[in-house]
Amino acid sequence: MRGDLVRKLTARVLTTGGALVAFGVVAFTGATGWGLALAVAALAAAALERRVRPGADVLAETTLVAAAVLVGYARSLDAGFDPVLAVTALALLGLVLLAGPLHDAGMLEIRAANLAVRQWSPAVATQLGNAVLALLAVVAAAAALALPAWVALLATLVVSGGVGAVALDLARRRFRPGSGGGPVGRALRRLQPEFLLYFSAPPGSEYQVTMWLPYLERIGRPFLVLVREPEFLGPVSAATRAPVVFCPTLKAMDEALVPSLKVAFYVNHGAKNSHCVRFNHLTHIQLHHGDSDKAPSANPVSGIFDRIFVAGPAAVERYARAGVDIPAEKFEVVGRPQVEAIEVRREAVRGLAGPTVLYTPTWTGHHADANYCSLPQGETLVRALLARGATVILRAHPYTTQNPASARQLARLTELLSTDRARTGRPHVFGAAAGRDLTLTECVNRSDALVSDVSGVISDYLYSGKPYAVTDMVGEGDRFTERFPLAGSAYVLRRDMSNVDEVLTALLQTDPAESARWHTRARYLGDFPAESYAEVFLAAARRHLDPAWTPPGPRTGGDAGLADAATGPLSPTA
């Protein structure tokens, strides 16, 4: 988060400083050419800030740059009062002042992707600020070349025409909406979706949604994804064929939540979830975006949902251990379908020559009690792995680079692995190759063992049956496994890495915790047949959509167990 703040502050300083310097050079010196060049640089800084801070208010800076460009234009022409340039100035300043309000108006409109609707003005309105910046750059170039003022006026009038069209369409949508609601609502009513996935989160969190989309699609019923932040509309819609709807306001949500909807799924405990939970005709189901012993995995806010889908009985115990009192009937054990493609290794493999180890450091968290990040000690660990001839897959948490210190520590580890790869030829995987080109499942399947911080990665890895080590970055010592029971069948690395050699010997050679892992696996991930593991979740979801639904085929043996697990809540004794 601190790294994100640094980027935003840097962009703010560049924009404001650039505008002041550009105006000062044009207004108070004779260096008109330099002043116009600085104005273009200030415009580029403003465009950068709008990317870093999508809601940035750069009105004052843009106005200052526009004044600098117009003064510079007048000096370049050196023809006294020019009525064409005066009209250009008025139109240009009008655009600068209108772009912000029209952007805000566009951001208040419902928008959709993967849905057959004609809806152009809200999307265009959100880009008007960039259009004005580009227009000012064109006018600055015309001024630098001393082109006739009508060139600048023509460019300004073209943009003004577009802005006028956007303004008229937004006004029509606001004050004269079509009968039967807006186009998005009408299209959704035609689609008749039966459930929705609701999502609100900080930027960069779309992975929380995309991990669930393949399984929601496999339910086989029409659905939509409802996002509350505009930056998720593009990446989420690219990951699914289902409609993705951006609802900036409660009024927009009223339009999107059509009568055919029966169930709402959630993947986190975002504050805006309450905006959807208020629709009491829906069944609200929390899915989470991973299963771990982290403090946020036992969030008391879970109690607001009608059902809480959990991977295994250990998740229910976690809430009780944290003192969170939630009725047992709200929990349903459905497994974690994302692990179905993980290859299970049932035979013990000890003493491998040149093992491949997956290292997954987590991030520093939003709060101190959720900081389990091992990157400060990561170099000690990686050097120890390299000394044992291991090939390392380094897959860091997506939020890691938001903290400058963590970003530097991660960069040091990638440098170590890159150097060792060049020297020894061992195919270490890191950076984008591990975090973007490979899925977590592919990383798990390529590895022989895991070293991880407290995170949901451990639960997923547990499905493979392969050995894993956990870092005790909170310094709990002997109490660590009490707070984090998943570490009970792991090899625990101390905070200072003083036992790293002992732990790596157990992890890669002797593996004394092998039998304990299978018991832990059933508690954390459910005891369901591997060949139909994901069907447990799918059956539970279908039953909430249609209480009369029953799984196809005979219910005998393992299939009967699956059906029973999916039909009702977890019993208090599970």
Image (spheres, grey):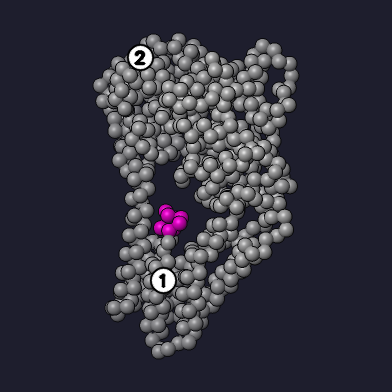
The secondary structure type at the circle numbered 2 is helix
Q: Nearer the viewer, residue 442 or 406?
A: 406
Work out whether 154 lies above or below 504: below
User: Is residue 491 among what the camera can see?
Assistant: yes
Residue located at (39% from left, 68% from top): 60
User: Is residue 127 among what the camera can see?
Assistant: no
Question: Quarter holding the C terminus?
Answer: top right
The quarter of the displayed image where residue 195 is located: top right
Residue located at (66% from left, 52% from top): 184
Per the rendering, the mark at residue 63 is 1
Q: Callout 2: 10 Å neighbours few (<14), some, many (20+)?
A: some
Q: Nearer the viewer, residue 542 or 19?
A: 542
Image label count: 2
The quarter of the displayed image where residue 17 is located: bottom left
**Residue 213: where, in percent of width, then height?**
59, 36
Work out whether 365 lies above or below 460: below
Residue located at (46% from left, 44% from top): 202
Q: Amino acid at mark 2?
A: Ala
**Residue 356: where, in percent of width, then height?**
41, 23
Mark 1 vs mark 2, CA separation in Å: 66 Å
Residue located beneath label 2 in the image: 506
Residue located at (41% from left, 28% from top): 294
**Residue 274: where, in percent of width, then height?**
53, 42
The quarter of the displayed image where residue 511 is located: top left
Q: In terms of sequence position, does the residue under pointer 1 or pointer 2 come before the other? A: 1
Give the number of the mark in front: 1 or 2. 1
Magenta includes 352? no
Magenta includes 52? yes
Q: Nearer the viewer, residue 59 or 389?
A: 59
Magenta extent: 49-56
Q: Amino acid at mark 1?
A: Thr
Q: Callout 1: 10 Å neighbours few (<14), some, many (20+)?
A: some
